[in-house]
Amino acid sequence: MKTLKNHTLIYDKECPMCNLYSRGFTKSGMLDENGREAFTEISLRNKDLIDVHRAKNEIALVDHNSNEVIYGLDSLLLIIGNSFPQLEKIARLQPLYWFFKKLYSFVSYNRKQIIPSAENGAEDACVPDFNLKYRLLYIAFVAVFSAWILSMFSGKLGVNLDRNFLREFAVCLGQIFWQTVFLRIYLKDKIWDYLGNMMTVSLMGTLLLIPTLWTDFDSVFYMIYFGIVVFIMFLEHLRRCKILKINYIPTISWILFRTIALGIIILTTF
């Protein structure tokens, strides 16, 4: 790999994905061995050069030759393009560049909801701004994706459930509406953080169901497996509520809705 020398990538230490790719850049030789620096451990020299607020939303790459800083997707493309020029050229073509730019923002603004951190409340924490557009997009994406997978999985449960995307989508939307209505006053300014985390719990459950779509076992197996997945989701929901420093009320409300929804589905299919 061709090393991009005298550059420092300022990454979010609490973000596993940021940790992974920034370490990958240094281990592969695309950056110097000391070519990355955690945002929470930033040197005074680099802190004076970067826009601290912007660096929370878009990863910053400091060029020590010119003392210039580039941010976000452009910083990643510069590193990659130094070793793979053709890849950078392709990624900068429209509409690919537009798509990757939006995808980067989509992940960046929701990264603390995808993988939460207990350190988010610290003054020097690398926490992105709240962006309503990208939060709503994340919620919508998970709702549609989960409904799609659940509609395919439900037919394997052997309880007279046919493949019905609209039914599962209605359940997903109902969960969001239910939690928003019942918890908005209680959670106050944490409601959007909670909803993002709740959708990640749903996404985790959905991903765990995907491998079963290519199997053909008895319906009892799928019911047991589904129960295990729900239990994992329950534990993850509790864990995330603890990180957000909210008590058991959101989890109780979450379980209550799912119980009611399951009861309605069973009553309407028999």
Image (cartoon, rainbow, N blue to C red):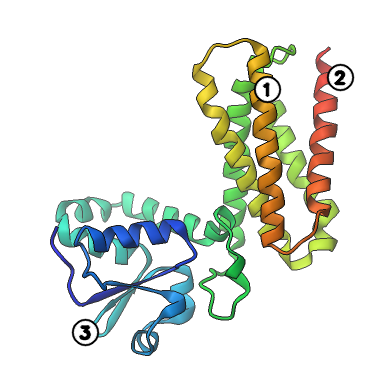
Q: Residues within 10 Å of mark 3 (few under 14, many from 20)?
A: few
Which residue does the image show at 72% across and 26% down from the upper left? 167
Q: Quadrant of the N terminus?
A: bottom left
Query: Can you tell which of label 2 and label 1 is closer to the viewer?
Result: 1
Q: Which one is in front, 266 or 229?
A: 229
Q: In this figure, which residue is indicated by the disc labeled 2?
A: 267
Q: Earlier in the sequence, mark 2 or mark 1?
A: 1
The percent coordinates of residue 83 (x first, y second) are 16, 58
The percent coordinates of residue 129 (x first, y second) are 56, 69
Q: Is residue 192 visible?
A: no
Q: Is residue 198 left or right of residue 1?
A: right
Q: Which one is in front, 228 or 69?
A: 228
Give the Cα distance between marks 2 and 1.
20 Å
The label shown at residue 224 is 1
For numbered disc 3, what is the local secondary structure? Answer: loop
For numbered disc 1, what is the local secondary structure? Answer: helix
The label shown at residue 117 is none
Q: Quadrant of residue 141?
A: top right
Query: Can you tell which of label 1 and label 3 is closer to the viewer?
Result: 1
Q: Earlier in the sequence, mark 1 or mark 3?
A: 3
The percent coordinates of residue 166 (x first, y second) are 68, 27
